[in-house]
């Protein structure tokens, strides 16, 4: 099994104005994940990897195919983890953005590797429920990564969890990017559509940027067996 967080070399390109997109080349993708060219395009035909992720860019060798790094590595890891349990058709259905109405019992949170055990008390205090939506557990996982990388007090994490859950409940789907930032000494979070992060001025300190779409798919596949019916 590969780990998508271990890849270091980066290709940063500018798309749509000033937005910087971190890309991985097709050659690098195949080398890191160990999948074949045939597997990659078979999964594309099965709609497991979106066609819009296949980005043609000019390179010194001519045109090369690149992919949005974090999204494609998360997606391939999720497919590899689940391909022995589900057919390609079943995987495509599970990964469909329309299939996102699952609820997960509260006592299952401690079984989810993506959710930090140290964050559980803050989750219980800020969002006490018997069951959580896919959007909520995805937010918990994203903020677990933020908490791992940033020194944020429990009080501030509870506030971020509470406000983030409230915002997500009003949004449709999970194709959002969560940005955690500090303004005038206060912690905030904001959601932007797709994988495009919000561009702030230099007075705003951005702490973390987490695309939620692929993280939600990873969790949906991994925890199919513990969701509520």
Image (spheres, grey):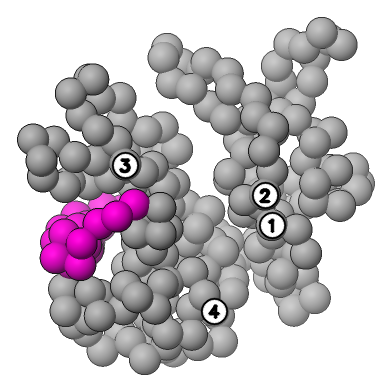
> Is 165 within the magenta?
yes
Residue in the picture at 8% in, 35% down: 184
Q: CA–CA distance between discs 4 and 2?
A: 24 Å
Q: Nearer the viewer, mark 4 or mark 1?
A: 1
* For marks 4 and 1 on the same chain, the one whose residue lies earlier in the sequence: 1
Q: Nearer the viewer, mark 3 or mark 4?
A: 3
What residue range appears in magenta?
Answer: 150-175
Q: Nearer the viewer, residue 226 or 100?
A: 226
Q: Secondary structure at mark 2?
A: helix
Q: Secondary structure at mark 1?
A: loop
Dividing the image into 4 quarters, which one contains the N terminus? bottom right
Please say if the residues under marks 1 and 2 sit with CB atoms less than 8 Å apart. yes
Q: Which residue is mark 4?
A: 223
Q: Nearer the viewer, residue 217 or 124?
A: 124
Percent across and percent down for residue 60 are 82, 8
* Residue 141 versus residue 229 in the image, above or below: above
Left or right? Give the position of 147 relative to 171. right
Q: Which residue is mark 1?
A: 3
* Residue 20 versus residue 38 in the image, above or below: above
Q: CA–CA distance between discs 3 and 2?
A: 20 Å
Please say if the residues under marks 3 and 2 sit with CB atoms less than 8 Å apart. no
* Residue 215 versus residue 185 in the image, above or below: below
* For marks 3 and 1 on the same chain, the one whose residue lies earlier in the sequence: 1
Please say if the residues under marks 4 and 2 sit with CB atoms less than 8 Å apart. no
């Amino acid at each position: 099994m590969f780990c998508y967080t271990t890849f270091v070399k980066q290709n940063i390109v500018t798309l749509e104005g000033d937005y910087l997109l971190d890309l991985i080349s097709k050659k690098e993708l195949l080398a890191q994940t160990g999948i074949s060219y045939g597997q990659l395009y078979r999964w594309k035909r099965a709609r497991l990897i979106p066609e819009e992720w296949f980005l043609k860019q000019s390179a010194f060798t001519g045109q090369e195919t690149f992919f949005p790094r974090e999204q494609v590595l998360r997606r391939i890891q999720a497919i590899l983890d689940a391909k022995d349990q589900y057919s390609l058709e079943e995987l495509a259905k599970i990964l469909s953005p329309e299939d996102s109405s699952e609820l997960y019992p509260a006592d299952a949170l401690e079984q989810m590797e993506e959710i930090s055990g140290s964050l559980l008390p803050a989750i219980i205090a800020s969002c006490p429920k018997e069951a959580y939506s896919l959007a909520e557990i995805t937010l918990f996982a994203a903020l677990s990564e933020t908490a791992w990388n940033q020194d944020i007090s429990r009080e501030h994490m509870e506030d971020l969890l509470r406000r983030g859950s409230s915002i997500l409940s009003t949004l449709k789907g999970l194709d959002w990017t969560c940005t955690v930032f500090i303004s005038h000494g206060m912690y905030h979070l904001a959601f932007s559509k797709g994988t495009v992060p919000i561009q702030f001025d230099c007075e705003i300190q951005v702490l973390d940027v987490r695309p939620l779409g692929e993280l939600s798919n990873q969790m949906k596949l991994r925890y199919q067996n513990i969701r509520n019916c």
